[in-house]
Image: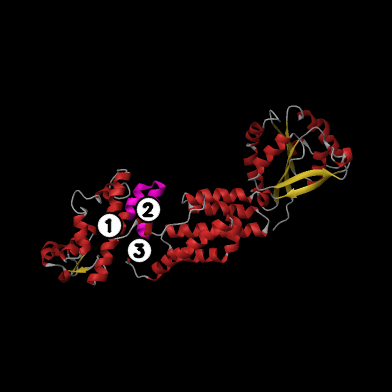
Amino acid sequence: MTEPTSTLLICTVGGTPEPVVAALKHWQPKRVCFVHTPQTKNDVEGKILPKARDEGVDLDAGRYHLLALSDGQDLARCVDELRPLTPQVTEWAGRGDGFRVVVDFTGGTKCMSAAIGLQASRWPCLFSYVGGGERTKEGVGVVVSGTERVVYQANPWDALGYQAVEDFIVLFDQRAFRAAAQLVKRAKSHVDRPDRKRELAALKHLARAFDAWDRFDHKKANNKLKNVTKMANDLRAALGQQKADCVLAEIGKLNGHLTQLLEATPPSRHHVVDLLANAKRRKDEGRIDDAVARLYRAIEAMAQVACKERHSIDSTEQVPVDRLPETLRAEWASRATEGTVRLGLQDAYRFLAALGDPLGEMFERLGLHGMSSPLLTRNRSILAHGFVCVSDKDFNKLWSAALSLADIEEASLPSFPILGG
């Protein structure tokens, strides 16, 4: 990694110039932002810059600027008035590895120091504090002039990484897995501590695993969850042992479902169950149209599984005409292509019913056929053929029917971990 050569120093200005001058000497910044109050504005050019010049740090007018805080005793106002610094910091740090940002919070009021600490906690920066080798009042007073030195410098992301973890948990529990993974990936790039990097990497694998699963990329999900299991101690450090152990136990159960999915040749009941669980997650997110689209596919897949496992029809897209019951053969013969017909959802269930299959008969009993079928809500959805916003009531009707067809309780569906609470 390139050693930083261009430093942006942001420093709070207090009643004495010496700490600021010490920071300027130590960091040798290319550019400086002096954060001051009305009481200390004149001190920058009247005291700090002349003393810095005497110490060999000569800042011309093009290398520094001032940021005024209207009230150094008002924490909330200080935080708000420091916000314009964020894009400046982002732009400077974004220039490359040779550019760094240092925040020195030695000078100014306690509110100013706290405010800039809060604001800078998410910046890609170093924290700096100027102390001294000697203090008045038997070591508990102010620093004796001339003994100032930078006694503390740290990456705030190392100390405050828990904020990224807390934000990760919120996004994860909202099922925003990709956003959660991106958040900790960004945080990981800012931290220096190897242990904190490993913790954030474990969380990244966790989020990416469930993001892949939500997108039906079961192989990738399986590989990522294996990585999480290998990083169990790092996950415990990030989430706490009790929560992490619960998550790891849930992953163990989910791995069984993933293994069945990966070993099964579709269509299978395992794929149906996975579609139903995915529909439930979309419903919980409030994405009703997405949920209904998955329910429709799950119900279609149930018919495909029945045709394959009980009637040796490998694909409903190519059903031989001679396998059609007499009651349907005459009706569908004109649709045949090269001796086969393609069956959509409704036709697949009519086919099963004509064969006396219990799934086809249940489909009819549940009222899923004909013009009053709740399946039509999917067709009217903007994600299918219409422009209608599907309601919770529409989903609940179809959800109940789908669970009945699948002969499964909602509680038996695989569920993803919840990290909060």
Q: On residue 113, which mark appears?
A: none
Task: Report whether 281 appears left or right of 311.
Answer: right
Q: Which residue is mark 1?
A: 404
The number of callouts visible is: 3
2 and 3 marks in contact (CB < 8 Å): no
> Is 173 above or below relative to 216?
above
Q: On residue 271, which mark appears?
A: 3
The span picked out in magenta is 274-294
Query: Residue 361: x, y in percent?
Result: 19, 60
Query: Residue 415: x, y in percent?
Result: 42, 57
What is the quadrant of the N terminus in the image?
bottom right
Q: Quadrant of residue 106?
A: top right
Q: On residue 280, which mark appears?
A: 2
Q: Residues within 10 Å of mark 2 (few under 14, many from 20)?
A: many
- The residue tagged with tag 1: helix, strand or loop? helix
Of residues 18 and 420, the one nearer the viewer is 420
Mark 3 is on which residue type? Answer: His
Q: Residues within 10 Å of mark 3 (few under 14, many from 20)?
A: many
Q: CA distance from mark 2 to mark 3?
A: 14 Å
Task: Report whether 173 appears left or right of 324.
Answer: right
The label nearer to you, 2 versus 1, is 1
Of residues 190 and 214, the one nearer the viewer is 214
Q: Quadrant of residue 344?
A: bottom left
Q: Earlier in the sequence, mark 1 or mark 3?
A: 3
Dominant secondary structure of the residues highlighted in magenta in the image? helix
Q: Is residue 92 visible?
A: yes
Q: Earlier in the sequence, mark 2 or mark 1?
A: 2
Query: Residue 322: x, y in percent?
Result: 15, 71
Q: Is residue 291 magenta?
A: yes
Mark 1 is on which residue type? Answer: Ser
Q: CA distance from mark 1 to mark 3?
A: 16 Å
Name the residue rendered at 60%, 62% in the picture: 233
